[in-house]
Image (tube, helix red, strand yellow):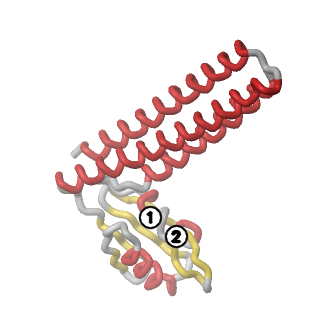
Amino acid sequence: MEEIQLFLDDAREHMDKSIKHLATVLSQIRAGKATPALVDSVTVEYYGTMTPLNQMSSVTTPDAHTIMIKPWEKNMIPEIEKAIINSDLGLNPQNDGEQVIINVPPLTEERRLELVKQVKHEGENAKISIRNIRHDALHHIKALKDEGVSEDDIRRGEEKVQELTDEHVKKVDELVQHKEEEIMKV
């Protein structure tokens, strides 16, 4: 049934977006080692506009515990430091006149457990989003009954929506599991 396929495609697209969003959020949660993604959420006032850090500087990680931010304009170093301090990342930037250096301290056991809790919370949010998409898709497919679509086609459509949901919930679980292992690895 063409109408049912449209709802399935729409549901798949929205569920994929939920997975992508979760992956982005999880990449910004610190797992004990330095990655450029840790500062992706930092924006800096750059000529009156809030600009993502990675669009005004090069962000590298020379080792597992250091992030180096080399702005394209040296006069931006104090602004970058201020933005990092004001972010909720809990990082302490320093500069050597050329670049901003962030030493990422190793995580304590207590902090690791807090981060795992945060990861699980984000995973649950993604699952809720996916279940809401499933609910909408099922609602639209059931409404096709009034338009003369056969009960067999509706049932098959509902089964496909459930398969899609199960597939995406499994992806969420895999992402969460991977991030938890990354955080707990000392």
**In this picture, residue 134 sits left or right of residue 169:** right
Q: State the residue in front, 52 or 127.
A: 127
> In the orientation shown, which residue stands out farthest toward the top?
152
Residue 182: give its label: none
Q: Which quadrant is home to the N terminus?
A: top right
**In this picture, residue 82 sits left or right of residue 134:** left
Q: Residue at x 82, y 21 (%)?
A: 148
Which image quarter: residue 177?
A: top left
Which image quarter: residue 7?
A: top right
Q: State the residue in front, 87 or 142.
A: 142
| Image x and y of residue 14, in percent | 63, 41
Please rate how many residues cluster around mark 2, counting C-alpha atoms within 10 Å: few if below 14, some from 14 to 19, many from 20.
many
114 versus 182 height, above or below: below
- Secondary structure, mark 2, is helix
Q: Which residue is mark 1?
A: 39
| Image x and y of residue 166, in percent | 51, 26
| Image x and y of residue 86, in percent | 39, 77
Q: Which residue is mark 2?
A: 53
Q: Residue at x 25, y 44 (%)?
A: 184
Name which residue type carries label 2. Leu
- Secondary structure, mark 1, is helix
167 versus 179 height, above or below: above
Q: State the residue in front, 54 or 175.
A: 175
| Image x and y of residue 13, in percent | 66, 38
Q: Which label's residue is closer to the chain start, 1 or 2?
A: 1
For the residues bearing labels 1 and 2, Cβ distance under 8 angstroms: yes
37 versus 69 height, above or below: above
Q: Residue at x 31, y 42 (%)?
A: 180
32 versus 165 height, above or below: below
Name which residue type carries label 1. Val
